[in-house]
């Protein structure tokens, strides 16, 4: 069974930065594409970007620039670096591995 656990969410001021982590347990981490998503209050969950097992990343166009996904296969962990945070980045951030989702980590950005 696969478990995904996100962490790193916090209350931050606009302009700040955060690095979120997602640790995967189970044997299917390696060789699989993983993704970061977010759900803002009152909105649907949206894709931020994905990363392959070899570290190739793709981002949704309007997410490019401030979001960076990275991966440490030795630690079964992917990361999401968010810079220049804006109030509209306030959301629960999730990672995904195939059909598995984490519980999410809350990011709140104050103006």
Image (cartoon, rainbow, N blue to C red):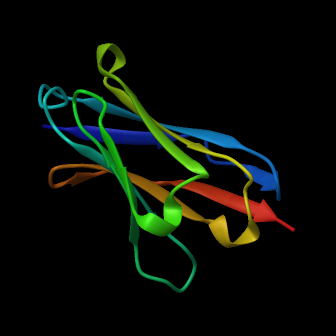
Above or below: residue 12 compared with residue 63: above
Tell me residue 91's x, y (percent): 58, 66
Considering the image in quadrants, where does the N terminus appear? top left
Tell me residue 89's x, y (percent): 64, 65
Tell me residue 105's x, y (percent): 53, 52
Considering the image in quadrants, where does the C terminus appear? bottom right
Whether residue 88 can be seen here:
yes
Residue at 15% across, 50% down: 98
Tell me residue 6's x, y (percent): 46, 42
Residue at 54% across, 86% down: 42
- Which quarter of the figure has residue 44? bottom left
Whether residue 103 can be seen here:
no
Q: Is residue 109 left or right of residue 20?
A: right
Query: In front here: 63 or 8?
Result: 63
Residue at 40% across, 63% down: 60
Residue at 20% across, 42% down: 33
Q: Is residue 10 left or right of residue 76?
A: right
Above or below: residue 32 compared with residue 61: above
- Which quarter of the figure has residue 90? bottom right
Q: Is residue 89 left or right of residue 33?
A: right
- Which quarter of the figure has residue 32? top left
């Amino acid at each position: 069974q696969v478990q995904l656990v996100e962490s790193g969410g916090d209350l931050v001021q606009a302009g700040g930065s955060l690095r979120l982590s997602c640790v995967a347990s189970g044997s299917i981490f390696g060789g699989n594409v993983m993704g970061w998503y977010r759900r803002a209050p009152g909105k649907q969950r949206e894709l931020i970007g994905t990363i392959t097992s070899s570290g190739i990343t793709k981002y949704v166009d309007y997410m490019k620039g401030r979001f960076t996904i990275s991966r440490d296969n030795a630690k079964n962990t992917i990361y999401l670096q968010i810079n220049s945070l804006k109030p509209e980045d306030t959301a629960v951030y999730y990672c995904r591995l195939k059909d598995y989702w984490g519980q999410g980590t809350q990011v709140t950005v104050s103006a």
